[in-house]
Image (cartoon, rainbow, N blue to C red):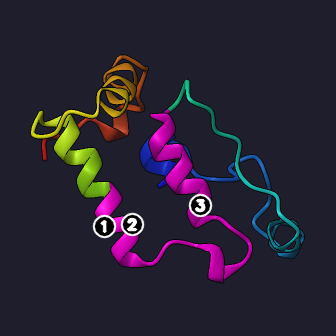
Amino acid sequence: MYFIATGRQPFSNHAHDEVLALDICNGIRPDINDQEAPKCYIDLMKWCWNSNPDNRPNVAEVHKLVDIFHLNTCGEQRDYDIQEQFKKANNLPHSECLECEI
């Protein structure tokens, strides 16, 4: 999710070693803000990052939220807050590696 939002690998400025693994276990997470992705997407990503697995969303919850995001971006639903967050994100600079047709 982080790479999709930012075009960067998480922790690209850290060695991927046991120190990073321990830091992650102790709660370090990649930096991201609403200048890089819609807030609702960031909130979902951070929910998935919860250090307690019991507090993370299950696949059905993630699927439901992604469906809501999709329905709002294609105009089938009218949550204007979500629509505005995605419109704003579409105007942000994106990594060239993410430019593709789906």
* Residue 55 within the segment the image draws in magenta: yes
Q: Which residue is mark 2?
A: 62
Q: Compare marks 2 and 3 and give the one earlier in the sequence.
A: 3
Q: Residue furthest bottom?
A: 54
What amino acid type should be assigned to the residue bearing mark 3? Answer: Trp
Residue appearing at x 50%, y 54% in the figure: 44
Q: Is residue 63 above or below residue 83?
A: below
Q: Is residue 96 left or right of residue 31?
A: left
Q: Is residue 84 left or right of residue 45?
A: left
Residue appearing at x 34%, y 30% in the figure: 86
> Residue 84's image quarter?
top left
Mark 2 and 3 residues: CB-CB less than 8 Å, in contact?
no
What amino acid type should be assigned to the residue bearing mark 1? Answer: His
Q: Which residue is mark 1?
A: 63
Q: Compare marks 1 and 3 and give the one earlier in the sequence.
A: 3
Task: Give the magenta range.
Answer: 37-65
Residue 43 percent across, percent down from the top left: 55, 48
For the stretch drawn in magenta, the main secondary structure is helix
> Residue 97's image quarter?
top left
> Residue 52's image quarter?
bottom right
> Rounded to the nearest whole Å, what is the CA distance between mark 2 and mark 3?
10 Å
Q: Which residue is mark 3?
A: 47
Q: What SS does tag 3 mark? A: helix
